[in-house]
C-alpha cells in the first residue's frame, strides 16, 4: 500500500532554503517508509503559488477558488504532512498562516505532521515549539516530537541531517501506525477514527429536524 | 416563476464620486427601486434587515407598508427577517398586519444574521443562532396557526393564553422561506415544514449552492411534502448590464473593486467565474441565469441584487428597466419551456394558499409530522412529550 505525504512549504524565493529543508525532510521520510517495505508518494505544495488565491479567499468572505478546493482536498486526504515555514519577525510567515487559516478546522484532525522552519540565525529556533506546535495542536494534528530547525549555518552540518533522520523516522512510524487503527476493540474507538474533512463539500449527514426541535417546541 | 430584486440596504460611498447618500436618500432610493420593480413588471421586492451601520433597514414592515400603499401588484418580502434577535411574537404581529395592509402581498425569508455584536443588543448570543432560529420560528408558526397559545421555551418569556393580533389575513399565514448560505440545519428546517429554501448564491461557488439545494430537496421529499423536484427553491443573482460587455465592465469595475464584502480582493473576472456575478449584456445575463436551473433544478423565485456598492440610484433604476423589459420576459418564457408539468412554477402565494383551503397542510404547525405519523415513522410531539 502506498501512502501519500503532502509537503507544504512557504518559502518565498527561488531557490529557497525553506524548500530545500522541505525536500530533505520529504526524502528522509520516503527513505524511512520504503525501508519498512512500504511505498510513499510525495506531493509538494508551494504556498507562494497560492498567494493570490489565498488573498482572494480571505477578502471574499471565504469563497474558495477552484485551486484552493483542490489543495484542501489534497491536504485532508493525505496520510501525513510536512509543513515548513521561514521565520519572519519571530514567527511563521503570514503566508504560511494564511494557508492553514484557509483549511477546514477539521482538515488535519489526527494527521501525523512534521514541522520545520528556516531562518538566518539559530536564535529563532523556538518558533517551532512556541508558534508552530500550538498552531497544529489547535488543529488537532498529531505533531511528531522532533521538529527541525535549519539556520543558514546548519545546512551541510551533521547535526541537521541527524535531526532530519530522527524526525523522519518519527513521522514514518506515525504514518504507518495509522493502519493499526483498523484493529478495533469491542466498542468503536472514536479516537482511532478521527473526523477529518476538507470542508469542501456540504455534509449530507444532516441532523434530523426532530432532534433540532427537541426542547424548543414550546410544549415539552 | 417569480422575479424580483433584493436589497441589503447598505449606505455605501460611491467610489467614483467619494460621496455617500444620506440615510434619507438611501431609504428614498430603496422605495424608488421597489416602485420601479413593479413598474417594469417584476414580481418581488425584498428588503434586508440590519440593526447596525452602515445599514438603514432596521424597520422592514414600516418600509414595506409604505411601499404596499404605493403599489398594486408587487409582492413584498424580506431578505432576511432576523428570526434570532427579533421577538417572534412581534414578527407574528407585524407581518400579519402587513398582510392586511397589502391585501396578502407578503411573504418572508427567515435568516439568522451573522454579526456577533448585534445579538447582545437584543439579549441574545450568536452561538445560540441555530437554536434561536429553530425555537423562534416554531413559535412564530404556532402564533399564526393557533388561536390561543400556551408556550414555554428557552429564549423568551412564557406565553399563557396569548392570542396574536391581527390574525393572519383570511386565516392564512404568509408563505415563509428560509435563507442560509452554509448551515445545513436551516435547509433541514425549511424541508421539515415544507417551506421554501432560498440560497443567497451570490457569495459562494455554484457547486456549494447545488449541494445545499439538493440537500433541501431530498429532505423536502423525505418529510412528505412532494417530490424533491417540487420543493420550493429561490436563488439570488447579481448582475450589471450595458449594451456591450466591455461597457458594462468599464462602468461597474470601480464599484466592484471597492464593494463591501468582496472589494479589494478577487478581480471582477475571477469573481464572475467563482460566483454567479454577471457583468455584461442582457443576453449574457439571460444565458447565465438560465444555467442556474441546470444545477439547482427548476426553481420558483429569482431575486437579483442590483443596488449595492454605492451605485447611483439612477443607474440602478436603469438596470431595473433592462431587467424588466429585456431580461425577465425571456427568462419567464425559457424557464417555463424547460419546466416539467409537475414542478410548480410559482411559490405559494396568498391567493393559492387561501384557495387550498383551511384543511391544507399549510395550516398545520408541523405538516411533516402528520405525514410521518401516517407512515408510522413517529408519533405526534404532544404524545411524545407526555410519554
Image (cartoon, rainbow, N blue to C red):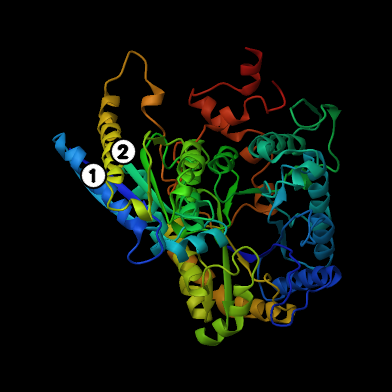
In x, y percent, where is residue B181?
56, 51
Quadrant housing residue B327? bottom right
Quadrant housing residue B126? top right
Mark carried by residue A191: none
The answer to which of B202 and A91 lies nearer the viewer is A91
Helix, strand or loop at mark 1: helix
Q: In the rendered image, which quarter contains the N terminus of chain B?
A: bottom right
Residue behind mark 2: A167
Circle 2 packing at 10 Å, graded few (<14), some (14-19), many (20+), is: many
Question: Is residue B100 depicted above or below B290 in this figure?
Answer: above
In x, y percent, where is residue B384?
61, 17
The answer to which of B349 and B274 lies nearer the viewer is B274
N-terminal-most mark, 2 or 1: 1
Query: Is residue B203 at all visible to an observer of this figure?
Result: no
Residue behind mark 1: A28
The answer to which of B86 and A60 lies nearer the viewer is A60
Q: In the rendered image, which quarter contains the C terminus of chain B?
A: top right
Residue at 53%, 54% in the rendered image: B344
Q: Chain of mark 1?
A: A
Q: Chain of mark 2?
A: A
Q: Are marks 2 and 1 in contact (CB under 8 Å)?
A: yes
Question: Is residue B46 depicted above or below A109 in this figure?
Answer: below
Circle 1 packing at 10 Å, graded few (<14), some (14-19), many (20+), is: many
Helix, strand or loop at mark 2: helix
Q: Is residue B21 left or right of residue B281?
A: right
Query: Is residue A135 at all visible to an observer of this figure?
Result: yes
Amino acid at each position: 500500500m502506498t501512502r501519500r505525504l503532502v509537503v507544504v512549504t512557504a518559502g518565498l524565493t527561488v531557490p529557497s532554503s525553506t524548500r530545500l529543508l522541505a525536500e530533505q525532510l520529504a526524502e528522509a521520510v520516503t527513505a524511512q517508509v520504503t525501508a519498512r517495505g512500504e511505498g510513499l508518494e510525495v506531493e509538494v505544495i508551494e504556498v507562494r503559488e497560492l498567494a493570490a488565491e489565498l488573498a482572494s479567499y480571505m477578502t471574499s468572505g471565504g469563497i474558495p477558488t477552484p485551486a484552493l478546493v483542490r489543495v484542501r482536498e489534497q491536504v485532508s486526504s493525505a496520510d501525513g504532512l510536512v509543513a515548513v515555514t521561514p521565520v519572519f519577525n519571530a514567527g511563521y510567515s503570514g503566508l504560511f498562516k494564511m494557508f492553514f487559516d484557509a483549511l477546514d478546522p477539521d482538515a488535519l484532525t489526527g494527521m501525523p505532521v512534521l514541522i520545520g522552519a528556516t531562518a538566518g540565525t539559530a536564535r529563532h529556533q523556538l518558533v517551532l515549539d512556541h508558534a508552530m506546535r500550538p498552531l497544529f495542536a489547535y488543529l488537532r494534528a498529531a505533531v511528531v516530537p522532533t521538529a527541525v530547525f535549519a539556520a543558514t549555518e546548519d545546512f551541510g552540518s551533521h547535526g541537521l541531517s541527524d535531526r532530519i533522520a530522527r524526525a523522519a523516522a518519527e513521522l514514518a512510524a506515525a504514518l504507518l501506525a495509522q493502519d493499526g487503527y483498523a484493529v478495533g476493540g469491542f466498542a468503536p474507538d472514536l479516537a482511532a477514527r478521527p473526523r477529518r474533512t476538507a470542508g469542501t463539500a456540504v455534509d449530507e449527514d444532516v441532523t434530523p429536524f426532530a432532534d433540532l426541535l427537541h426542547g424548543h417546541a414550546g410544549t415539552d | 416563476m417569480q422575479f424580483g430584486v433584493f436589497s441589503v440596504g447598505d449606505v455605501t460611498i460611491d467610489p467614483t464620486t467619494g460621496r455617500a447618500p444620506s440615510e434619507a436618500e438611501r431609504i428614498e432610493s430603496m422605495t424608488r427601486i421597489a416602485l420601479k420593480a413593479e413598474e417594469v413588471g417584476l414580481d418581488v421586492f425584498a428588503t434586508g434587515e440590519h440593526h447596525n451601520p452602515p445599514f438603514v433597514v432596521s424597520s422592514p414592515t414600516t418600509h414595506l407598508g409604505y411601499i404596499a400603499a404605493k403599489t398594486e401588484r408587487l409582492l413584498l418580502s424580506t431578505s432576511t427577517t432576523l428570526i434570532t434577535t427579533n421577538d417572534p411574537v412581534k414578527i407574528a404581529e407585524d407581518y400579519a398586519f402587513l398582510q392586511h395592509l397589502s391585501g396578502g402581498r407578503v411573504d418572508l425569508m427567515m435568516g439568522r444574521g451573522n454579526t456577533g455584536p448585534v445579538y447582545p443588543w437584543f439579549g441574545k448570543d450568536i452561538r445560540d443562532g441555530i437554536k434561536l432560529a429553530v425555537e423562534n420560528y416554531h413559535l412564530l408558526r404556532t402564533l399564526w396557526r393557533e388561536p390561543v397559545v400556551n408556550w414555554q421555551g428557552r429564549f423568551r418569556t412564557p406565553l399563557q393564553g396569548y392570542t396574536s393580533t391581527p390574525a393572519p389575513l383570511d386565516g392564512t399565514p404568509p408563505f415563509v422561506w428560509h435563507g442560509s448560505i452554509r448551515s445545513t440545519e436551516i435547509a433541514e428546517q425549511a424541508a421539515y415544514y415544507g417551506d421554501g429554501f432560498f440560497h443567497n448564491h451570490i457569495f459562494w461557488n455554484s457547486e456549494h449552492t447545488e449541494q445545499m439545494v439538493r440537500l433541501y430537496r431530498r429532505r423536502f421529499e423525505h418529510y412528505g411534502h412532494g417530490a424533491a423536484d417540487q420543493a420550493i427553491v429561490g436563488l439570488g443573482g447579481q448582475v450589471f448590464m450595458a449594451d456591450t460587455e466591455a461597457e458594462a465592465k468599464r462602468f461597474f469595475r470601480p464599484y466592484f473593486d471597492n464593494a463591501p464584502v468582496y472589494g479589494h480582493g478577487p478581480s471582477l473576472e475571477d469573481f464572475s467565474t467563482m460566483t454567479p456575478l454577471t457583468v455584461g449584456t442582457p443576453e449574457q445575463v439571460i444565458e447565465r441565469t438560465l444555467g442556474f436551473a441546470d444545477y439547482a433544478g427548476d426553481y420558483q423565485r429569482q431575486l437579483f441584487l442590483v443596488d449595492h456598492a454605492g451605485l447611483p440610484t439612477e443607474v440602478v433604476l436603469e438596470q431595473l428597466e433592462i431587467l424588466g423589459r429585456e431580461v425577465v420576459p425571456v427568462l419567464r418564457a425559457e424557464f417555463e419551456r424547460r419546466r416539467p408539468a409537475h414542478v410548480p412554477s410559482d411559490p405559494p402565494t396568498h391567493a393559492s394558499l387561501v384557495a387550498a383551503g383551511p384543511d391544507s397542510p399549510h395550516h398545520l404547525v408541523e405538516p411533516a409530522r402528520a405525514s410521518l405519523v401516517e407512515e408510522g415513522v413517529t408519533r405526534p410531539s404532544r404524545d411524545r412529550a407526555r410519554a
